[in-house]
């Protein structure tokens, strides 16, 4: 097995700020490619420093993960055995290191793409999921209220908008968005609110037709989250508080929903299992993303049929996506066709935005 990574720095269409301080002009993501048994698979890792990952940690961790996968041998040529092989790959990576979700996701996505291509089937068929998925919303970052409203108007064809809050003009922002947009609004404070201020804002959110509140308080502030959910007619959705399947039990009775992201939990397989477990525990499920290319978004779309709310818009935030094959229909649903694997390909062999060649990791 041979694994290569390439770091891409991709300009964003608009500045994208959230309540946590993070770069807002460029998306830095890592393309992962695997060659195994004459097959090729594409994956993507989007490291976020908040979760303890950087380009540097990926460079150190990916070769170790790849070595563990290389010991599994070639993937089987039938679906049941291939699914079991992919689960063993997840277990092998988890045995090497804890967390590091995006590093694992890059390899996991590439393995799923490779196996599905080898079997000649779309990823949904390999997973046993449906191609009939909910529409995605569209996310708009923190900015001046008038600027956010202008972007909301431009995105008015989306059936729902997710508005980033946690700044100094949250209510004014929502008022101006509502003036130009009639659909459901989802708000995401990215840990940026204080409890009493959030409580005062609740009636206004209801009045303005807000559908849900995502991560109002810091990740470990579970008592605060429970306190607000007990007082809120709107579902509170845990994002930063919910990285992997292991976090679900502690959130029962605390929040109404969880945001599952492939880059947090470790890829397609872990996301599928996490979503099924979340449903068993009674959670509403959002399927989210980072500012990923169509590679990561296509992987998410393969499990989107299990979600109540879909927030798979990372590639739409890019000024230019270096991959093709993933399209939205008129209802803003990602179209999952019959092409093998993820169904996406590089627009050109050499990506102009490529700034660094990552480590090769023979397995």
Image (cartoon, grey):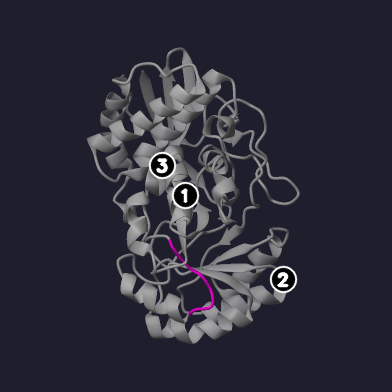
Of all residues shown, which one is farthest toward the front? 280
Range drawn in magenta: 232-238
Q: Which residue is mark 1?
A: 275
Q: Nearer the viewer, residue 40 or 360?
A: 40
User: Label 1 crowding class (10 Å Cα cut-off): few <14, some 14-19, many 20+?
Assistant: many
Residue shown at 32%/46% (left/top)? 54
Q: Is residue 40 visible?
A: yes
| Left or right: where 141 falls relative to 241 | right
Q: Which residue is mark 2?
A: 182
Q: Are marks 2 and 3 in contact (CB under 8 Å)?
A: no
The nearer-to-camera label among 1 and 2 is 1
The answer to which of 93 and 325 lies nearer the viewer is 93
Q: Quadrant of the N terminus?
A: top left
User: Tag 3's secondary structure?
Assistant: helix
Residue located beneath label 3 in the image: 270
Q: How many marks?
A: 3
Between the C-alphas of marks 1 and 3, the distance is 9 Å
**Of the numbered discs in the image, which one, if any, rests on residue 193?**
none
Q: Please give the name of the residue rendered at 52% of the width and 18% of the height, measured from the top-left corner.
A: 118
Residue farthest to the top? 38
Lower sequence index among marks 1 and 2:
2
Quadrant of the rendered structure where residue 211 is? bottom right
């Amino acid at each position: 097995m041979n694994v290569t990574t390439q770091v891409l720095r991709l300009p964003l269409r608009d500045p994208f700020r959230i309540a946590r301080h993070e770069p807002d002009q460029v998306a830095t993501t890592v393309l992962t490619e695997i060659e195994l048994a004459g097959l090729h698979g594409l994956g993507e890792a989007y490291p976020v420093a908040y979760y303890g990952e950087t380009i540097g940690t990926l460079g150190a961790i990916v070769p170790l993960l790849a070595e563990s996968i290389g010991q599994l041998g070639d993937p089987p040529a039938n679906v049941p055995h291939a699914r079991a092989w992919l689960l063993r790959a997840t277990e092998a990576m988890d045995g090497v290191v804890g967390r590091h979700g995006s590093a694992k996701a890059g390899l996991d996505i590439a393995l799923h793409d490779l196996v599905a291509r080898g079997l000649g089937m779309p990823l949904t068929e390999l997973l046993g999921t449906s191609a009939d998925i909910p529409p995605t919303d569209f996310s708009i970052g923190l900015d001046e209220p008038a600027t956010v409203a202008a972007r909301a108007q431009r995105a008015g064809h989306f059936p729902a908008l997710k508005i980033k809050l946690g700044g100094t003009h949250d209510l004014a922002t929502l008022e101006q968005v509502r003036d130009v947009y009639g659909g459901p609004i989802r708000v995401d404070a990215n840990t940026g609110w204080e409890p009493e201020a959030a409580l005062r804002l609740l009636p206004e959110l209801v009045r303005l037709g807000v559908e849900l509140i995502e991560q109002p308080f810091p990740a470990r502030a579970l008592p605060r989250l429970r306190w607000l959910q007990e007082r809120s007619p709107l579902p509170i959705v845990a994002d930063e508080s919910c990285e992997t399947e292991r976090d679900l039990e502690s959130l029962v009775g605390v929040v109404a929903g969880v945001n599952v992201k492939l880059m947090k939990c470790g890829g397609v397989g872990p996301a599928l299992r996490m979503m099924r477990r979340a449903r068993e525990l009674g959670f509403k499920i959002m399927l989210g993303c980072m500012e990923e290319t169509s590679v990561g978004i296509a992987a998410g779309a393969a499990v989107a049929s299990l979600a109540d709310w879909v927030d798979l818009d990372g590639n739409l935030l890019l000024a230019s996506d270096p991959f093709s094959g993933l399209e939205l229909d008129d209802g803003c649903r990602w179209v999952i066709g019959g092409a093998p694997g993820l169904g996406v390909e590089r627009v050109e062999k050499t990506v102009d935005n490529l700034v660094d060649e990552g480590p090769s990791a023979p397995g």
